[in-house]
Image (cartoon, coloured by chain):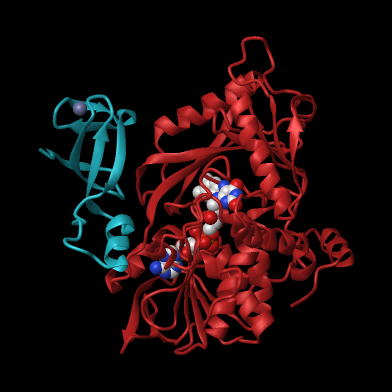
Chain colours: A red, B cyan
């Protein structure tokens, strides 16, 4: 792998960007691997990277049915934060954030991490009380969250609707300084490049049709490119997970929904933080190109189809206009959706399931982009050692049997 | 906006409806163990393709069975639960 540096960037610029090396190698499928990861999203690619880098296991394949990063990793609104409520969640999401903070350097690939801070905005005294409770929980968990008052919130978001007849006026909210955004494609491509350089095979257009189980152990997978042997199998397939587990009698508490996002035409800088309104459920940030990147809640009809439905579009956009009447003039450039895997307690499922050798990394629902470095670290640990990492243990599937749920539905303010 | 058929009210806007659960999970009889109980409570398994679900029409307050395709969103049946 040729390393990127300021010098090589300048060199390429002078040559008119004509001979950039291929970022990752197109792998050819071998008959047998020490570990196989299904799903070439951020979690799957990060898993392969940490298997090779941390555990020295390089006979690894990532099998992706489409193109890498073409699932939710390439469809999300790229918000990164660790302002969760429960200690288990903070341990998980703050591990991810800390790894994100060093990731461009670690991968020698610019993921464009921009820690511009995030405001979860409240509008009523009751919401402010909830925000105070969450901010306190964050501080007890050692995360840099704090309560922000109305004056500071208004200064942070000068264009927010503060007119006398505004439905949702800012009364303050929760602020996290280290929150922000990163380039989603770069996270997938950076992990793919680094994993490929360590010898991992990344196989695109290769769909896993079934998991092969013999005598209670995983022995391989059946793919559209033929059969592959392995005794360590990681599933990082987001909304497609139940299609692979249900035929093996593994029952998962997952329902899938479409989650939509939008970008506007580019405009001059108008918003330099990530903003989520508790009142409307709409959130947004401004990309480096000037587009507003806008998201909101889940569609209310379960689906595996990657199109969003109209009622939620209307709700998200009317929320945006309530927050920023000035944006009524903007045109939307694009709208899209991803199929997300939603779990009753809004926390991921990490751990073994069903036959020996099978490990899950799923249930991230609407919020797993921010967790990619941690999800990869933990699934790699499980595949390499056969057991849990201390941080993944509370997220084991058995929590739905013991009743020890980690209910972050309220802690995260909105679904993500 | 898609129209959903309520067995009592006819075709109405999808926003009037609320998804409850995937249908067909029988409540375990007697004194089920924790695994059976968890499967009953949580085993949604997000079926892809043809699926039968329990929905609530919030306008009239009735729960009913809806048969539809979870990939294409095509609705093929609607049946009262009582
Ligand atoms: C609109 C939207 C906005 C979001 N906003 C945010 C946000 O702001 N912040 C945040 O943290 N999270 C956000 N999320 C959630 C986040 O995108 C996901 O949780 C995360 O990307 C999941 O990563 P993944 O690698 O698990 O899944 P994916 O990126 O979906 O990767 C799974 C891969 O598995 C492949 N696959 C599936 N089945 C098979 C098979 N049988 N064989 C081979 N390959 C298969 C798929 O093609 C896919 O590429 C958002 C999601 C959406 C849709
Ligand atoms: Zn009705």
Farthest residue, direction left? B82
> Toward the viewer: A43 or B72?
A43
- What is the x, y in percent for residue A216? 33, 86
In percent of the image, x 80 and y 58: which residue is there? A16
Q: Is residue A109 visible?
A: yes
Q: Is residue A325 above or below residue B66?
A: above
> Toward the viewer: A277 or B71?
A277
Farthest residue, direction top? A164
> In this rendering, would A290 be left or right of A258?
right
Farthest residue, direction front? B31
- What is the x, y in percent for residue A175? 73, 40
In percent of the image, x 14 and y 32: which residue is there? B7
Q: Is residue A198 visible?
A: no
Q: Is residue A124 above or below residue A362?
A: above
In percent of the image, x 65 and y 61: which residue is there? A91
Q: Quadrant of residue A412?
A: top right
In percent of the image, x 58 and y 17: which residue is there? A167
> In this rendering, would A95 be left or right of A116?
left
> Toward the viewer: A161 or A89?
A89
Q: Quadrant of residue A56?
A: bottom right
The total of numbered circles placed on residues is: 0
> In this rendering, would A266 be left or right of A126?
right
- What is the x, y in percent for residue A304? 36, 52
Q: Is residue A55 above or below residue B46?
A: below
> Toward the viewer: A11 or A276?
A276
- What is the x, y in percent for residue A162? 69, 17
Which quadrant of the rendered structure holds the N terminus of chain A? bottom right
Q: Is residue A386 above or below residue A70?
A: below
């Amino acid at each position: 792998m040729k390393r990127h540096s300021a010098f090589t960037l300048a060199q390429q610029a002078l040559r008119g960007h004509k001979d950039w090396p291929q970022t990752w190698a197109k792998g050819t499928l071998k008959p047998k691997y020490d570990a196989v990861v299904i799903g070439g999203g951020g979690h799957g690619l990060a898993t392969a990277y940490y298997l090779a880098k941390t555990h020295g296991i390089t006979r690894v394949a990532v099998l992706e049915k489409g193109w890498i990063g073409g699932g939710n990793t390439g469809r999300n609104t790229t918000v990164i934060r660790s302002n969760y409520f429960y200690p288990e969640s903070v341990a998980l999401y703050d591990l991810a954030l800390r790894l994100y903070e060093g990731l461009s350097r670690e991968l020698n690939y610019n993921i464009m991490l921009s820690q511009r801070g995030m405001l979860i905005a409240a509008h009523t005294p009751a919401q402010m009380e909830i925000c105070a409770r969450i901010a306190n929980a964050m501080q007890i968990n050692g995360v840099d969250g704090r309560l922000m008052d109305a004056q500071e919130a208004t200064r942070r978001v000068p264009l927010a609707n503060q007119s006398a007849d505004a439905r949702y006026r800012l009364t303050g909210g929760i602020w996290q300084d280290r929150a922000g955004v990163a380039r989603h494609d770069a996270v997938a491509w950076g992990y793919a490049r680094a994993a490929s350089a360590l010898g991992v095979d990344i196989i695109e257009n290769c769909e896993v049709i079934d998991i092969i189980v013999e005598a209670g152990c995983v022995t391989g997978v059946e793919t559209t490119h033929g059969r592959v042997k392995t005794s360590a199998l990681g599933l990082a397939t987001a909304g497609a997970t139940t299609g692979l587990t249900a035929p093996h009698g593994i029952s998962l508490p997952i329902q899938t929904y479409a989650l939509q996002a939008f970008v506007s035409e580019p405009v001059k800088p108008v918003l330099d933080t990530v903003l989520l309104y508790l009142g409307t459920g709409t959130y947004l940030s401004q990309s480096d190109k000037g587009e507003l990147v806008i998201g909101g809640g889940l569609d209310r009809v379960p689906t595996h189809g990657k199109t969003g439905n109209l009622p939620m579009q209307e709700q998200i956009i009317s929320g945006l206009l309530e927050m920023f009447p000035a944006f009524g003039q903007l045109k939307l450039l694009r709208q899209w959706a991803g199929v997300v895997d939603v779990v009753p307690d809004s926390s991921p499922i990490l751990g073994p399931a069903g036959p020996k050798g099978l490990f899950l990394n799923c249930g991230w629902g609407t919020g797993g982009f921010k967790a990619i470095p941690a999800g990869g670290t933990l699934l790699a640990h499980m595949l390499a050692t056969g057991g849990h990492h201390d941080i993944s243990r509370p997220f084991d599937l058995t929590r739905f049997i013991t009743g020890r749920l980690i209910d972050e539905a309220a802690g995260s303010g909105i679904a993500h | 906006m898609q129209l959903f058929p309520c067995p009592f009210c006819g075709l109405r806007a999808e926003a009037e409806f609320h998804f409850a659960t995937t249908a067909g999970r029988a409540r375990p009889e007697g004194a089920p163990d924790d695994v059976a109980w968890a499967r009953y409570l949580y085993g949604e398994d997000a079926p892809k393709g043809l699926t039968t679900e329990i929905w609530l029409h919030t306008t009239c307050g009735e729960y009913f069975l809806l048969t539809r395709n979870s990939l294409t969103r095509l609705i093929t049946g609607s049946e009262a639960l009582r």
